[in-house]
Image (spheres, rainbow, N blue to C red):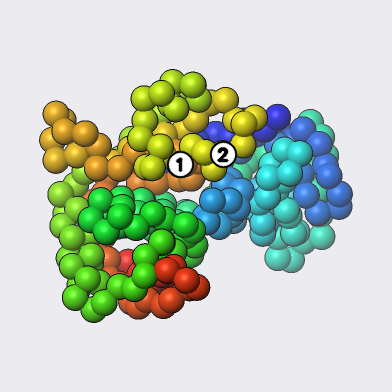
């Protein structure tokens, strides 16, 4: 199995790994990777893989029987994918990844705010490098509510709340955490260790503002998110709303 190194440290931009196997003529599985595979509403990372004398562009990353890095020869080259046992250097497209981290953390704040103040549970989300949307169980948001949501989100950003993550055994998580916030019931029974992402409260003595199960990448402090603007809303079926937002 590929070591999912991006779960331990989402700030790594360059890393070394060994090719475990080639899957076809356009993808490889590494022993460890910092390239995030598409999932949970967050897009895959892109970047490059290189050896001493060859280079490839990482155009897609997907989780199958291991994490598959989809490769294309770097511009001006015609190299076959690296063979099993090769040592490679991975370099992330950091601007793209960091945008995903900012938007994903903003989505956590928005989900918590909607649940806290409107009893609106998140039902889906989609992050992009330049925009994001969130679907929730709510009849309809009006303009004054959207203004309040935007104002409060930017207050939470400016409060520079810490963002932490850690792993709990599933049994402990189910016994101690709020099921509405963590949504552990959505995870398959085969997952026995739960990665929890937590956004701090007003001070160290307070309960976290948000605590939920998530395997995505996030910034370390809400201040990194930057200014947030609600760009619109739309109805998505019976009592389902979509909120769209962008970051500065």
> Which residue: 45% across, 45% down?
217
Q: Which residue is mark 2?
A: 187
Helix or strand or loop: what does disc 1 sit on? loop
* Direction from residue 39 to residue 77 in the image, left or right: right
> Which residue: 74% across, 59% down?
72
> Which residue: 67% across, 32% down?
2
Residue 12 seen in render: no
Residue 129, placed above or below residue 181: below
Where does residue 17 sit, x and y in percent of width and height?
Answer: 65, 34
Q: CA distance from mark 1 to mark 2?
A: 8 Å
Where does residue 246 sit, x and y in percent of width and height?
Answer: 35, 70
Residue 193 seen in render: yes
* Direction from residue 187 to residue 79 in the image, left or right: right
Q: Residues within 10 Å of mark 2 (few under 14, many from 20)?
A: few
Q: Quadrant of the N terminus?
A: top right
> Which residue: 19% across, 39% down?
201
Residues tagged 1 and 2 counted as in contact (Cβ below 8 A): yes
Where does residue 30 sit, x and y in percent of width and height?
Answer: 70, 36
Residue 8, placed above or below residue 107: above
Res 20 → quadrant: top right
Q: Which residue is mark 1?
A: 183
* Direction from residue 210 to residue 65 in the image, left or right: right
Helix or strand or loop: what does disc 2 sit on? loop
Res 225 → quadrant: bottom left
* Direction from residue 46 to residue 96 in the image, left or right: left
Between 196 and 173, the residue placed more toward the observer is 173
Where does residue 231 sit, x and y in percent of width and height?
Answer: 33, 77
Q: Residues within 10 Å of mark 1 (few under 14, many from 20)?
A: some
Q: In the image, which disc is placed on residue 228? A: none
Q: Quadrant of the C terminus?
A: bottom left
Between 228 and 97, the residue placed more toward the observer is 228
């Amino acid at each position: 199995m590929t070591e999912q190194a991006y779960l331990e440290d989402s700030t790594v931009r360059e890393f070394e790994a060994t090719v475990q196997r080639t899957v076809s003529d356009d993808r490889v599985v590494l022993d460890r990777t910092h390239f995030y595979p598409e999932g949970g509403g967050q897009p895959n990372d892109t970047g490059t893989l290189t050896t001493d004398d060859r280079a490839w562009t990482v155009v897609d990353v997907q989780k199958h029987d291991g994490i598959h890095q989809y490769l294309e020869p770097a511009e001006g080259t015609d190299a076959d994918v690296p063979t099993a046992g090769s040592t490679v250097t991975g370099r992330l497209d950091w601007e793209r990844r960091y945008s995903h981290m900012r938007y994903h953390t903003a989505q956590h704040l928005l989900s918590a705010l909607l649940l806290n103040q409107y009893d609106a549970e998140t039902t889906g989300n989609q992050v992009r490098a330049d925009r994001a949307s969130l679907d929730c169980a709510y009849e309809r948001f009006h303009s004054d509510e959207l203004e309040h949501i935007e104002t409060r989100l930017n207050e939470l950003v400016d409060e520079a709340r810490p963002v932490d993550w850690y792993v709990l055994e599933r049994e402990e998580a189910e016994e101690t955490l709020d099921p509405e916030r963590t949504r552990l019931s959505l995870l398959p029974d085969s997952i026995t260790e739960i990665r929890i992402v937590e956004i701090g409260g007003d001070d160290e003595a307070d309960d976290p503002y948000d605590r939920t199960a998530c395997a995505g990448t996030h910034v370390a402090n809400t201040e990194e998110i930057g200014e947030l603007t609600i760009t619109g809303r739309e109805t998505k079926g019976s009592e389902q709303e979509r909120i769209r937002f962008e970051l500065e």
